[in-house]
Image (cartoon, helix red, strand yellow):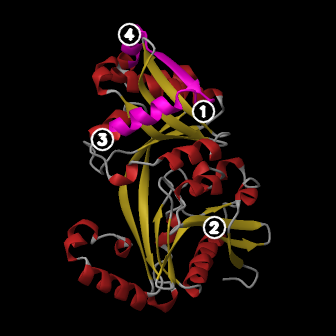
Amino acid sequence: MSSEMKCEIRDNWDDLLVSFPANKQDIYFTKKYLNLYETEKNKALCAMCVDGDNMMLMPYLRGEIRGYYDFETAYGYGGPVANTDDEKWCHNAFEAIHNFLGENNYVCGFSRFHPLFSNEKLIKEFNGKMENNGSAQLIYDRQTVAIDTSQSIEDIWKNQISSKNRNMIRKAEKNQLEYRAEYDFDSYEEFISLYRKTMERLVADDFYFFDDSYFKKLRENLSDCSFLGTVRKDDKLICAAIFMYSKEYGHYHLEGSDWNYSSLGANNYLLWKTACEMHVWGIREFHLGGGTSSSQEDSLFKFKKAFSKNLENFYIGKEVFNVPVYEQLCKDWEQNNYEKIHIYGNRLLKYRY
């Protein structure tokens, strides 16, 4: 760490992020996004490193346990982002931030890196450089899909959308499905109901059953950078999703659909029309995310892959700063939660469960 590098932890950082180049800004790095996942136990913070004009931000949710801290990036993607492409500086800043966290009572941290930013590269060289015999582990998780919306709409249709998918989109049009991009979130209550029914049908993890306050905060926090995409048949809402966008990147967030209308191509139509909407906004990449598993045969992944051949790699990172404390926390948890070991035993933050 150079003598000029200074690290600190901030409560607010969106005013700093907006000064970054457009291709270095994304909704997942903002305070207003992380705030959606703040609870009494998890506080949205940002570790930063500054050196002259160069700056790195690393937003996260801080947890507290027995007088110590841990961190986790919010649902979706995150990790570090810098306003410079200087690789050597970024590596040094990443190292400085993590050593700073270790010195400030942080035991460990879990990161979901951002596939469009490839920021997982920073952790690769970091292992072995950690102070106090700490460890950093990078794990490949799955592939994600991104539509190149910088192309013309004709080229997106011709070059990225598979022929089978184009047929489903044409079928939706023949079925007279109606798409709307609702910046006023007009159908929000209908969407929330549809989303929850979808999660029940899919027997989703409890995490995905967001409460009313989450949806209220999402509407308030992201009013200037999100919209509700809706598809209706004879005025009935059959498919809808929340989409987020920033300077150059768009994201597919939460979606709900009526299974009774699945054969009409509503989901295909929703994503196609939204890709067109993103193009109009000047969004360069519309990120659809991955499947529900790492399998290439995962049905959700295959559905998304029909929109583009542009695949990105998603990685997670596990870091331990204070090995003795971490091992003691895990040991105590395992002794008291024997029945949970087979469910949460491989998780870095297992002791939270």
- Give the SS element for disc 1: loop
Q: Can residue 160 be seen at all in this image of the molecule?
A: no
Which sits in the foreground, 34 or 132?
Answer: 34
What amino acid is labelled 4 in the image? Asn
Which percent across, then down, holds residue 3?
Answer: 74, 85
Question: For residue 175, which numbered disc appears in the image?
Answer: 4
- N-terminal of the pair, mark 4 or mark 3, is 4
| Front residue (pair 68, 209) | 209
Dot 2 falls on a residue whose secondary structure is strand
**Mark 4 crowd level (few <14, some 14–19, many ≥20, 10 Å Cα):** some
Q: Badges 2 and 1: C-beta atoms under 8 Å apart?
A: no
Q: Is residue 170 left or right of residue 72?
A: left
| Tag 2: amino acid | Cys
Q: Give the residue at the far right of this rendering.
A: 52
Which residue is disc 1 drawn over? 150
Q: Which residue is mark 2?
A: 46
The percent coordinates of residue 336 (x first, y second) are 26, 81
Density class for disc 3 (Cα within 10 Å; few <14, some 14-19, many ≥20) is some
> Magenta segment, which residues?
169-198
Q: Amino acid type of disc 1?
A: Ser
Q: Residue at x 54, y 63 (%)?
A: 79
Say whether disc 2 or disc 1 marks the residue closer to the N-terminus: 2
**Percent coordinates x, y for residue 93 in the rendering:** 64, 74
Residue 307 location, quadrant: top left
Which quadrant holds the C terminus? Answer: bottom left
Q: Earlier in the sequence, mark 1 or mark 4?
A: 1
Q: Which residue is mark 3?
A: 200
**Quadrant, the N terminus:** bottom right
Q: Can residue 219 be seen at all in this image of the molecule?
A: yes
View extreme (front): residue: 212
